[in-house]
Amino acid sequence: MAILRLFASAREAAGRSSDVIDASTVGELLDEACGRYGDAFAAVLATCRVWCNGDETERDAPIGPTDEVAVLPPVSGGF
């Protein structure tokens, strides 16, 4: 079971900052997360970057029980 970490608007849409999800690929994990958290989360996810263990990843990347998948929405800053 991989750890899913959610940040900013992804965290708000899901109503939590992390979860543990049983999946064999990043895509399976994200699909399960969309099923758990609904359409608002899926909409936010469409604009996010996804990282696995600190590296940007793809949906077909395999994951294991010690992996951490992070969903990072775009952020803006300024003065």
Image (tube, rainbow, N blue to C red):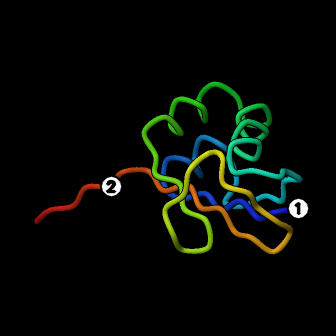
Determine whether, in the image, residue 26 is placed left or right of residue 9.
Answer: right
Quadrant of the frame with the N terminus: bottom right
Q: What residue type is labelled 1?
A: Met
**What's the residue at 62%, 45% (across, down)?**
59
Label 1 packing within 10 angstroms: few (<14), some (14-19), many (20+): some
Q: Earlier in the sequence, mark 2 or mark 1?
A: 1
Residue at image point 70% right, 54% down: 16
User: Residue at 71% of width from left, 59% of height from top?
Assistant: 4
Residue 71 lies left or right of residue 38; in this view the side is: left
- The outermost residue toward the left is 79
Q: Position of residue 67 (x, y in %)?
A: 74, 70
Of the pair 61 and 71, the residue shown nearer to us = 61
Label 2 is placed on what type of residue? Val
- The secondary element bearing badge 1 is classed as loop
Quadrant of res 69: bottom right
| 54 or 14, nearer to the observer | 54
Image quarter (top left, top right, bottom left or bottom right) of the C terminus = bottom left
Q: Mark 1 points at which residue?
A: 1
In space, the residues marked 2 and 1 are separated at their CA atoms by 28 Å
Q: Residue 75 carries which label?
A: 2
Task: Pinpoint residue 3: horizontal percent, then vertical percent.
Answer: 76, 65
Please state if 39 lies on the left or on the right of 9 as rendered: right
Instruction: Tell which of 48 and 38 is nearer to you.
Output: 48
Query: Could you say whether the residue bearing mark 2 is in a helix, strand or loop?
Result: loop
Q: Nearer the viewer, residue 18 or 58?
A: 58
- Judged from this view, the residue extending furthest toward the top is 39
Q: Vertically, is 39 above or below 25?
A: above
Q: Position of residue 51 (x, y in %)?
A: 54, 62
Q: How many marks?
A: 2
Which dot marks residue 35?
A: none
